[in-house]
Image (cartoon, helix red, strand yellow):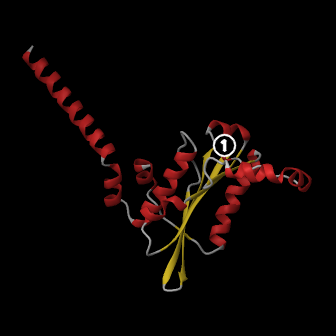
Amino acid sequence: MKAKLLKHKKVLIVIGIVIVIFVLFNIFKPQIAKVVLNDDEQHVLALVQKVKKCAKGSQIGDDFSAYKKIDPCENDRFICYSVVYEIDDGLMVCCSIEHISSEKLSEVQGCIVCSFNGTHKMLKKYDLLKYKIVELNETELDKTQEWSRNSYNKRVDASANAYECKNEVVDRKLKNLNDLFIKEDYEELDISLWKIKLFA
């Protein structure tokens, strides 16, 4: 009987320790990420977090690619980070941030821009219809210029936009964007995806 109680007590202690570690990890996650992740990974994490903030309940899907480009800019360097990936079948995202190297990531996180391409079903599933860009032809534009100006000012978040398209167009855009980054001499980053998923 005593042996059973002792064993039960040890199990409760182990469960208690696991819960404490989990709670502490979640409380100090941002501070731990700054220590564990390198500069490239911190930028990629910021981009993924922006995507998750916009696309409610989204996860990193297939074909994840991260890119970086550095260009000289007067007495400084201009840095651009981008991620491109499929969130779900029929939904992809390209998310980017640009800043000069003397600026800290924390100072420029408000400059992150996300562009989603997906089917109506997927945009609705991830609550992205509020970012949808409506493309008007010239006749409609003449009649609705005032409306389009007002509707743009009422957008939920000007740093995110969503385009509705067919499933095959989503796949084509995903491939075309990856090809474009490589053609424009962006460096494809070798990112530990498990770390990004852990801290996202």
Q: Is residue 130 toward the left or the right of residue 190 in the image?
A: right
For badge 1, the amino acid type reads Lys
Which residue is identified by label 1?
A: 130
Q: How many marks?
A: 1
Of residue 165 and residue 85, the one placed in the foreground of this image is: 165
Note whether residue 60 is visible: no
Q: Is residue 30 toward the left or the right of residue 20 in the image?
A: right
Residue 57, position as x, y percentages in the image: 53, 39
Q: Secondary structure at mark 1?
A: helix
Residue 66, position as x, y percentages in the image: 54, 62
Residue under the point 77% across and 45% down: 166
Of residue 182 and residue 152, the one placed in the foreground of this image is: 152
Residue under the point 17% across and 30% down: 13
Residue 50, position as x, y percentages in the image: 52, 52
Note whether residue 35 is visible: yes
Q: Is residue 193 above or below residue 10?
A: below
**Residue at far top of view:** 1
Residue under the point 27% across and 43% down: 24
Of residue 58 and residue 88, the one placed in the foreground of this image is: 58
Q: Quadrant of the N terminus?
A: top left
Q: Is residue 93 toward the left or the right of residue 76 in the image?
A: right
Q: Is residue 101 above or below residue 199?
A: below
Q: Is residue 70 above or below residue 195?
A: below
Residue 139, position as x, y percentages in the image: 92, 53
For mark 1, does the 10 Å Cα neighbourhood hold few (<14), some (14 to 19), or many (20 or more) residues?
some
Residue under the point 25% across and 41% down: 21
